[in-house]
Image (spheres, coloured by chain):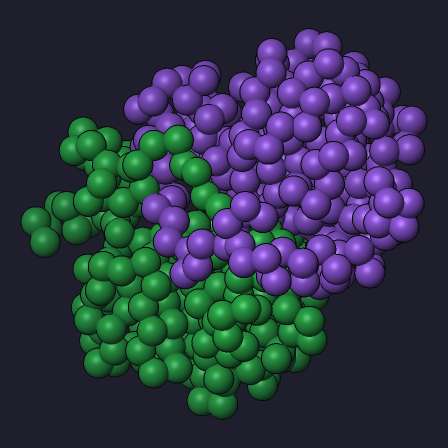
Chain colours: A green, B purple
Amino acid sequence: MQIAILIFEKLTVLDAIGPYEVLRSVPGWEVQFVGPEAGPIRADSGSLGLVADYSIDEVTEPDMVLVPGGEGTRPLIEDARVLVWLRNVAQQARWTTSVCTGSLVLGAAGLLEGKRATCHWLYLERLREFGAEPTSERVVEDGKVMTAAGVSAGIDMALHLVNRELGEEAAQAIQLAIEYDPEPPFDSGSPAKAPDQIVEAVTQVAAASDEWLGARTGSGT
Amino acid sequence: MQIAILIFEKLTVLDAIGPYEVLRSVPGWEVQFVGPEAGPIRADSGSLGLVADYSIDEVTEPDMVLVPGGEGTRPLIEDARVLVWLRNVAQQARWTTSVCTGSLVLGAAGLLEGKRATCHWLYLERLREFGAEPTSERVVEDGKVMTAAGVSAGIDMALHLVNRELGEEAAQAIQLAIEYDPEPPFDSGSPAKAPDQIVEAVTQVAAASDEWLGARTGSGT
């Protein structure tokens, strides 16, 4: 299994690294970090540099492609070269996958038409613009497309992918190897569970810095 | 709060990136990736390059230091320059922290003497060599030292750190922003929960490729 993880300027790094750590643990599976161009990439925080070993021109037939999210998805959904690449690799890939707002990039590439899909909760409804059916679940599988909710959900998605490909024992072994026995100190990881004032505060902070959300709030939709 | 995350050749990347994604989300907190030398770093899988923006000589007074784990900790626990740096920064830091086998590096630096600490479950008992008391919990706080269990446990630790510094609402807001509402498909994330044959298989695979575990098995201790 050859896995291409797309990385790009201003990605949210955990979206990519959560699944990477699971998928790279499978013997024989190879992960490649692929950028629009090969070379250094800066994370959305500005404080971390990653390296894309390959450009999208060099990786044309991965068995799995994964698109993370982050602020950097905004220019990406208008980047014809990347969208054409995604459409092409999705045609022959066993799995086309995303984490967080990476699903909006899959949508912009036309890969979610008529499909159930998920996204970071703040952006879930935007999936409709691409003909997808927003589905508020942590991991959504529809055909050979698998999407994960926000940021940390990529770890769960990757374990699902290992389970689907290799079965329960392989997925359990990797879960144990990365000691994924989560104990968050609070139960506020989804808008359905967090206190109302926390949901409101996070929404307001995001809208203030993000034209996508600001525009949505402004237009009342 | 200035946070130094130590990165080094053959680190396990999720150990660093889990906490990074939480800590960098706090307004006003600044994360710096610091290497023994500034420049490119290769992950333990070989398939990912990160960039250390700073060398340890350039970052001498962080408020928090975090040491991830991975195969690359083996040479690190014998690297006098890094261990002296850790001892120095720990003296004035508010928090000295680790994820996974990063705690063995804290131990080698003499920072865990008489302290309760945790580590990846496969390596937990090795903490005794450094005068620490191995503690099989996901996050262990003892004085101003906080250690996390294997790989994915760094996310939980970082939320604890935010809670300790800024309180519950700040930690809940970040948990919601990264949608950390974990749903692992199985309940096999710790040796106490995974099926026996999975624990045995993971232990054997690790021992076969790791002289630390192989040696321990060989000597019967």
In the image, is B128 to the left or to the right of B1? right
Count the marks: how many? 0
Towards the viewer: B189 or B106 = B189
Residue A26's place in the image compared with A16, above or below, is below
In the image, is A193 to the left or to the right of B208? left
Residue A147 in sight here: yes
Towards the viewer: A179 or B94 = A179
Residue B91 position in % (x across, y down): 72, 10
Quarter of the figure with residue A143: bottom left
Residue at position x 34%, y 22% in the image: B168
Residue B15's place in the image compared with B142, above or below, is below
Towards the viewer: B141 or B173 = B141
Residue B141's place in the image compared with A60, above or below, is above
Residue A17 in sight here: no
Give the quadrant of the N terminus of chain B.
top right
Residue A173 position in % (x across, y down): 59, 61
Give the quadrant of the C terminus of chain B.
top right
Residue extending furthest bottom? A92
Residue at position x 65%, y 14% in the image: B93
Towards the viewer: A80 or B46 = B46
Residue A52 position in % (x across, y down): 65, 62
Residue at position x 64%, y 69% in the image: A26
Residue at position x 57%, y 25% in the image: B140
Residue B92 position in % (x across, y down): 69, 9
Quarter of the figure with residue B144: top right
